[in-house]
Amino acid sequence: MAAKGGAAPATYSPSPTTFKKKRPPIFTDVDWVRPDGRDFHQCRPAFLRTGAVNAASGSAYAEFGNTKVIVSIFGPRESKKAMMYSDTGRLNCNVTYTTFATPVRGQASSDNKEISSQLHKSLEGAIMLDTFPKTTVDVFALVLESGGCDLPVVISCASLALADAGIMMFDLVAAVSVSCLGKNLVIDPVSEEENYQDGSLMITCLPSRNEVTQLTITGEWSSPKIHEAMELCLDACSKLGKIMRSCLKESASTSQE
Amino acid sequence: MVGLSVGEKHFIQGGIAQDLRTDGRKRLTYRPISVETGANGSARVKMGKTEVIASVKAELGRPNSSAPDKGKVSIYIDCSPTAAPQYEGRGGEELSMELSAALRQCLLGGKTGAGAGINLSSLSIVDGKVCWDLYIDGLVINIDGNILDALGAAIKAALSNTGIPKVNVASTAPSDEQPEVDVSDEEFLQFDTTAVPVIVTLTKVGRHYIVDATSEEESEMSSAVSVSVNRQGLICGLTKRGGAGLDPSVVLDMISVGKHVSEQLMNKLDSEIAAAEATMEEE
């Protein structure tokens, strides 16, 4: 019995708060291997599908590595009575995390409002709001699993869902972020890299119009580094845009058959 | 919001295109800035008719388990309906949240603390046990555009006259218990604000961008980019407002203009803060 009792704790996995408090030294070196073995300037493979939710007017599912996101679009439907008359449409964005999205249960639920407003800011420039006056389009995003780069994935997935719902847009919105770790710039960081990052830069853009709808920078950056990071992101955005476009074409051709 | 006739709109846009704004300024000129520092850890900043106050309070607290060697800073901005009726209820909440988030991003740097205006490690007293919780509160009293820059300046001024009391830790406490601390009410350590960046918002109207836009000018904007720049000329944060997209080359140009303007603003603010503190000491 005693042996059994002594062995039992060994089977418990360490809680995420107790291990890796210190930044692993490998991240500060010039040369290291990323946790998933990618090159610094290599994005995770993207899996995108439209039509994930039947009840919605449009929906999409995106999977970038461990980051899994589902977005549904409802509407355009009549704005709430309390809203003032508006001759342009309204966009209502809401991002939520599942309680099991993060290693520690319910950890990421605190700053939903901030992420929702970021999503709104990135999308509003791409949507032709004057095509649906007096009405509201709801964008509901759910992060099933948070594996890094959540916001960019949500944004890209939401624009795909909007296209699926037939909402008029100038272009699809592709979003990519870059983390600065020591001297290195790593694109499309995973959670582990994000936790140790010195700074981050996120761009959302309309790839075929070459327009930036949103740009956020945190941490300390010199101008040449911003140049480099922006170029990296814009290049990745245009590639992501192509993948999103082909996903839409694919779903359109299968529905015709 | 601001109700403008077509003629007035044309007047504002035309003036900006010709580098002569409605109040006689050039595109990259600020309105007169006045800084007033009050009691310990507070400041009032006026930029033209825009008026904000900021206060800094410090409390002893426990550090987060995820960052045991760091203190905590919370930034909260209040837009009261006394400034404008549309800030009643949810309208004010949304703006407050947006401003707080932008300031947090500009002042607190990256996850590891690189580029932070406030060094969180300096707020730690005993690792994992006791730290300072810094509460930065801003209140918008009067709104006439460019609130973010004014709040950034007010926080910088308020921090520069914040005294953090000296804390003596009883060294005898066992390692697993909360150590006894003695907060001195005579000795204060001046808060180091050399790393605190200034925020410059460039508002794009038509094909040009302007600094320190008034409410009327802001109503004509297509988008605005706020850059926070520290004394070394490094970018510590950037946010964009307004839906319209920008060409990447325009963004880069705005960043370099912002950097250039920030130098003047930084010097102007420093001298204003020094003057405000000098007048306080005389009284």
Image (spheres, coloured by chain):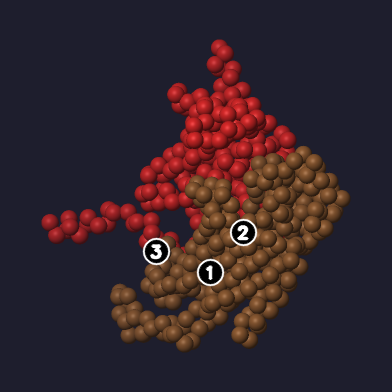
Chain colours: A red, B brown
Q: Nearer the viewer, residue B8 or A23?
A: B8
Dot label at residue B142: 2
Q: Which residue is mark 1?
A: B55
Q: Is residue B140 above or below residue A130?
A: below
- Residue drawn 58% across the image and 66% down it: B53
**Considering only vertical position in the picture, is A76 above or below B27?**
above
Q: Are marks 3 and 2 on the same chain?
A: yes
Is residue B206 visible in the rendered image? The answer is no
Residue at the (49%, 32%) spot, across then down = A80
| Chain under numbered label 2 | B
Residue B132 is situated, as x and y percent measured from the top left of the image, at 45, 72
Secondary structure under the numbered disc 1 in the rendered image: strand
Q: Could you tell me the amino acid type at mark 1?
A: Ser
Residue B65: give its label: 3
Mark 1 — on which chain does it sit?
B
Q: Depth-wise, is mark 1 or mark 3 nearer the camera?
A: 1
> From mark 3 to mark 2, how far is it between C-alphas?
40 Å
Quadrant location, the C terminus of chain B:
bottom right
